[in-house]
Amino acid sequence: MSDRVVLHVDQNAFYASVEMLRRPSLKTVPCAVAGDPVNRHGIVLAKNQLAKTAGIKTGETVWQAKQKCPGLVLIPPDYKSYLYYSRVAREIYREYTDRVEAFGIDECWLDLTGCPDRDGPAVAEALRRRMKAELGLTVSVGVSWNKIYAKLGSDLKKPDATTVISRASYREQVYPLPAGNLLYVGRATERKLGRFGIRTIGQMVDAGPDFLQAQFGIVGLSLFAFAGGLDQTPVALSGREVPIKSVGNSLTTRRDLYTEQDIKAVTYMLTESVAGRLRDAGMAARTVQVSLRDYALYNFERQAPLPRPTLLCSEIAPEAFKLIMAHFQPGQWIRSLGVRACNLIPQSRLNQESFLPDDRRRQAVFRLEDTIDSLRGRYGGLSVRRGISLVDRSLTEHDIKSENVIHPVGLSGP
Amino acid sequence: MERTYVTVVARITPQGDLFPLILRLEDGSEFTVDRRLQAPQKNKAKDGTSAWRFSCLIDRKPVTLFYDAGTHRWSIESSLPRGGQGK
Amino acid sequence: MSRPVPVTVILEMRASGTRHPLEIVWEDGRRYEITRSLYLGRKAARSAGSGECWLCLIQGRHVPLYYSPLTGCWWMDGKGQAEAPPAPEAYRPVKDRGHKGPGS
């Protein structure tokens, strides 16, 4: 059996690149796309080369970024544009193969095996040229015989480059790389490997499958396969893919929360906005995650599966609230709260047609929430409030949707 | 309700607003659009296509033009009076 | 250097779905007839942005005309400097919350 031809295409500094494409003057200053730079809880989602040179890192707070670079220009995210360019890029990829698997909004795997154009490096070069000529964006492309190595390849040279990881060269290219560079090796796994003196991908391979399985369970076998270029995971057929991995909103409130009522009000408000964004993106969630930071800056995150996939605030909010209250201690003053919808599926996969009274009520709620959305769209998010929001207006006097914070896949880790 | 595709010449403002100027049917008959009666309304289609309704005054009669922003095609309900100003 | 200039377009949208720009109105109000146009497809503009491009013959010269499906707007590559980059926002320090936590 001959090798597959797998490409991994990674948009360079995607959000920042789209902003610079639309406003080229931004290329001349250090700039970063950050959620809500006006209030203090924004984080850097993407940065341009000048900002990178100034030491700005994706994922750090706006506060930290400004310390490093006071002249940093901050741009609020424009997800509509990012989704548009992401979609157009995928249309271009689909001209070469129907095996196009999106991984987040700015990364894609392509499988060219058996396609008319199956010369990996040639297609990689064609894509780089077309991205620049047709979209004004640059990409890094990795070419190899499996998804893991293809992704390692695209990470090796940035921006605007093609890296081929071949059977002849992979040992020199891949084995010296840190274990943490491997897809699915997060910080915890990296630390654990480190305790055994395993720091590079090559050392993972040397450790052998039996050892890795003994330490990590069945996952250890996968880790060994990924490290050694043995991964056989196919590139999924393009179709109903999900470009966004999760949708969340968090808020640092103007005053701390300490009553159940206050917490409920803010939770519902955040969830309204998340539900609205899920609807806009045509997605439904299967898991809800809450995050909480208290006055002592103690943080936690917890997640729970939703009883069933949904995009309704009235179904997500009670679960989110339950999760928060399960971990909230009386006397704990909450400084910031976040609600995130994860494990997304396209809205079309929810069963719409059903004669169960429960589902009919659900559909009625969906229509009501849709009406609320269109009213909000016309008159702004503050015009329609739930009863509970009126409890303490100072808390909820934020139009959250326009102040949202979203975490692209790259931050929360693979 | 039958829908027929038509040719429309429109003025598009720098902000992207569309003002139909001329309507041309398949048989070549042409109609001048006097004016747009109101802001275009989004047509709620089941499959989420971006359909818009344009209420216009043509030959002093109200006519609804349907526009698909995805395919850039215009259509009318086939009850428009024939005749017009000729080609 | 080129800056994006939004323009008014008189556009013929045929029943078949093809689009033919007939005339543009420049930012100074002057009208320019498009003698002929050639659809080039997706293209990154010289000035800014990317979209669908028509190569238009206007007064004997071929000039690109762009349309963005994202914004629904038409623009051309104008002469001269693009606008200056936005200024970095003054960083606002954290507001004092006025209490030190429970028990205060």
Image (tube, rainbow, N blue to C red):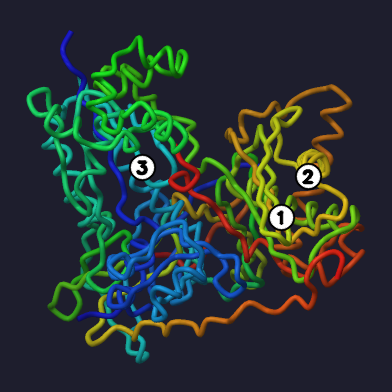
Residue at the image point whose x is 76% and y is 28% from the top = A307
Residue A152 location, x and y as percent? 26, 36
Give the amino acid at mark 2. Ile
- Tell whether label 3 touches label 1 (CB within 8 Å): no
Residue A372 location, x and y as percent? 78, 56
Which image quadrant is residue A196 in? top left
Residue A314 location, x and y as percent? 82, 43
Q: Which mark is residue A337?
A: 1
Q: Earlier in the sequence, mark 1 or mark 2?
A: 2
**The residue tagged with tag 1: helix, strand or loop?**
strand
Looking at the image, residue C65 lies above or below residue A305 = below
Quadrant housing the N terminus of chain A: top left
Q: CA distance from mark 1 to mark 2?
A: 9 Å
- Going by the image, does B76 lie left or right of B5? right
Nearer to us in this view, B54 or A362: A362
Residue C38 location, x and y as percent? 21, 60
Quadrant housing the C terminus of chain A: top left
Give the amino acid at mark 3. Glu
Tell me the residue that label 2 is attached to. Answer: A324
Q: Which chain is disc 3 placed on?
A: A
Give the amino acid at mark 1. Leu
Residue at the image point whose x is 35% and y is 92% from the top = C28
Q: Earlier in the sequence, mark 1 or mark 3?
A: 3
Q: CA distance from mark 1 to mark 3?
A: 29 Å
- Going by the image, does C29 lie left or right of C91? left
Eye-nearest disc, 1 or 3 = 1
- Report crowding for label 1: few under 14, some 14 to 19, many 20 or more residues within 10 A (C-alpha): many
Q: Which chain is disc 1 placed on?
A: A
- Tell whether label 2 touches label 1 (CB within 8 Å): yes
